[in-house]
Structures are given as C-alpha cells and as structure tokens.
Amino acid sequence: MGTPLHARGARRPVNLSLSETLVAEARQLTDNLSAQVEILLTEYVERERRARDAHAAGLRRTAVAWNAFAERHGSFTDEFSRL
C-alpha cells in the first residue's frame, strides 16, 4: 500500500488552540502527540473526501435520472409554457 501521503509531506509547525486538560490527558496516553493528531487529521480528511465524493456521485445520478425522465415524459413546465 505504500507510505501514506501525509507521511511524505514536509513538516511545519502550526498553532492550534486546544483544551489544556485534553492535551494533558492525551500526553499521558502517547509519546508523540503530533503523530497521533496527524493520524486523526488524516482519517478525518479521508472520511470527508469520501463523503463529498459520494454526495457528488449522488447528485450526478440524480441529474442523469432527471434528464432521462424529462426525455421520456417531457418537462413539468411544458404544459404551462407559452414559448
């Protein structure tokens, strides 16, 4: 499967505002908080990308179905249009 994309990118420091209590608890659970946050952020980005791709695919399927309906039955506005 290879190295995850995030692992190949250049590193840079970022500023985040996080709960002191949460950070303290997380530090008790891991030696490398940055790596854990990067893993979680990677999972979030991948999940959001999949959700957006699925939504876009659903919209494309809807457009295809709507166009097929309109070709077979005409547009709902045809009976009201004077053009």
Image (cartoon, rainbow, N blue to C red):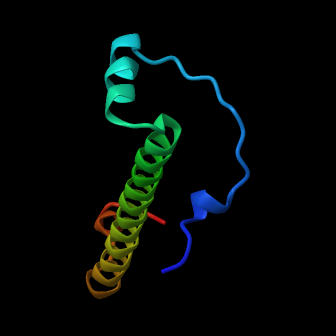
Left/right of residue 11 with respect to residue 61 in the rendered view: right
Residue 3 in the image: state x and y as whole percent.
Answer: 56, 71
> Relative to residue 15, is residue 21 depicted above or below?
above
> Relative to residue 16, is residue 30 depicted above or below?
below
Left/right of residue 39 with respect to residue 11 in the rendered view: left
Left/right of residue 5 with respect to residue 74 in the rendered view: right
| Residue 76 shows up from this direction | yes
Q: Residue at x 54, y 66 (%)?
A: 4
Which quadrant would residue 23 be assigned to in this image? top left
Residue furthest out toward the bottom: 72
In the foreground, 55 or 42: 42
In the foreground, 40 or 65: 40
Q: Residue at x 60, y 59 (%)?
A: 7
In the foreground, 55 or 68: 55
> Relative to residue 10, is residue 78 depicted above or below?
below
Residue 47 in the image: state x and y as whole percent.
Answer: 37, 56
Q: Residue at x 32, y 33 (%)?
A: 29
Left/right of residue 78 with respect to residue 17 in the rendered view: left
Residue 20 in the image: state x and y as whole percent.
Answer: 41, 12
| Residue 81 shows up from this direction | no
In the foreground, 10 or 52: 10
Q: Residue at x 44, y 37 (%)?
A: 31
Residue 56 in the image: state x and y as whole percent.
Answer: 42, 64
Residue furthest out toward the top: 20
